Amino acid sequence: MDLTTRLELIKSVGEEIITMGELTKLLETNDKPVAYDGFEPSGLAHLPFGVFRPLLLQDLLKAGVRFKLYLADYFAWINNKMGGDLDKIQKVGEYFIEVWKAAGVDTTKVKFVWASELMDKEYWKRALLIAKNTSIQRATRALTIMGRKEGELNEVAQYFYPIMQTADIFQLEVNICQLGLDQRRANVLARDVAERMKWKKPVIVSHHMLMGLQGIKQPEGYETDRDMDLEISSKMSKSVPSSAIFVHDSKKEIQEKINKAYCAPKEVTNNPILDYSKHLIFRRFGKMEIKRDKKFGGDLRFGDYQELENTFRKGDLHPTDLKNSVAEYLDKMIVPIRNHFEKNPRAKKLYEFVKHQETTR
C-alpha cells in the first residue's frame, strides 16, 4: 500500500492529529508503526467500545499499523471501578477481550497487554522520572483523563493516574497514541516529557467521541467547560446507562432508546442520531437508506454523509424517519456481538458476571 493511501486511512480515524508532519515522516520510515489504546475494565460494552473501536481498528490495520489493546486493570483499581475490587476488574477485562473477538477484531493482528503485567522495575523508574518532570498544576489538569475533576479526588493514588498513563506510552514502545479525544492531555504530556528527556516523541491520533443519546449537555457540577471540554463530557458513557446503547441490547431496546434520543428537526451540530450515522453507519456500510411511506415522499438513499446532513438541515427528512433507519443499522452492527454472547458458553458466563456487577463511575 502506498504512503498516500496509508495516510488517508489514518486521517479518517483521527479527528485531531499531532502532528501531520510527524505522522508522514513516521510512515515514510516505518512500515509497521505501533499504536495503542487503553481501556479501564468497567461495566458492559457500549457502542463506542464494542462497535466504533473495532471499526477504527480495521482501518488502522489496513494501513499497516500494529496495535496494542491495553487492559488498564490497575488504572480501573485506582479509579475505584467495580467497587475497587481488582479481581472483579480483571474478570471484566476478560469480558472485554471476548467483546472484541465477537466484534470481528482479528486477534492475530493485535496484542492484548495488561497493565498489571507491564509494570516492572523499569516502568516505575520511568514513572518517577515523568513525575519529577511534571508540575503539580500540570498533573492536576491532566486528571480529566480519568473522568474526574479536582474536587472529586480523595486519594493520593488518583494523582498517580496521569503519570502512569504517560509511562505506559514509553513502556509499551508505541509510535502512535490512538486514543479518544478525552485522553488528549495525557498524550500531550507524554510529548512534552519526551522532549525534555530526549525520548522518542509519540504521534497523537485522537479519535472522535460518540455523543450520548442526550446530545451535548452541560453536565451537572460543571459550571464551565474549563476542566472538561463540553463535547467530551457529553460522550456516550457506560457508567451513565441512560446515555448509552449497549452491545447486548435487543432490537426493541435499541429502537426504544433511539426513539427517546435528542434529535431536533434541522439541527445538525448537536444531534447524536446524525453523529451515529456519520461515524458508525457510513464508516461501516458506505451508504444509508431511509425507508419512508410513499405519502411522505418514499425511500431515500444517500451515498455519503454530507448528502444526508444537507437533507436533514433543509427539513426534507423528518427526525422519526432518520431514527427508524439508524436503529435498524445499529441493530445490524450489534447482532453478531449479541449472538456471540448468547451462544458461546464462556462468553455468556462472562456477560452474566459483568451484568450483575454495579457499574461505578
Image (tube, rainbow, N blue to C red):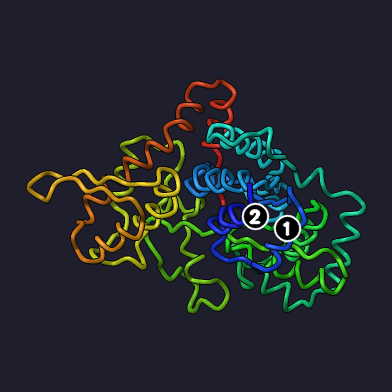
Q: CA distance from mark 1 to mark 2?
A: 7 Å
* Residue denoted by label 2: 3
- Answer above or below: position of 59 versus 208: above
Give me the disc on residue 16. Answer: none
Indicate the quadrant containing the C terminus: top left, top right, bottom left or bottom right. bottom right
* Residue 58 spot, x, y in % from top left: 57, 43
- Specify the amino acid type for callout 2: Leu
* Residue 336 spot, x, y in % from top left: 46, 30
* Residue 71 spot, x, y in % from top left: 69, 45
Q: Quadrant of residue 142?
A: bottom right
Query: Which of the two discs, 1 and 2, labels the residue nearer the N terminus?
Result: 2
Neighbourhood count class around disc 2 (C-alpha, 10 Å): few under 14, some 14–19, many 20 upward: few
Could you tell me which secondary element the residue under label 2 belongs to?
Answer: helix
* Residue denoted by label 1: 28
Q: Residue at x 14, y 46 (%)?
A: 298
In this rendered view, identify the residue nearer to me: 199 or 310: 310
Q: Residue at x 55, y 78 (%)?
A: 226
- View extreme (front): residue: 2
Can residue 82 be spotted in the picture? no
Seen in the image, is 106 located left or right of residue 129? left
The answer to whether marks 1 and 2 mark residues whose Cβ atoms lie closer than 8 Å is yes
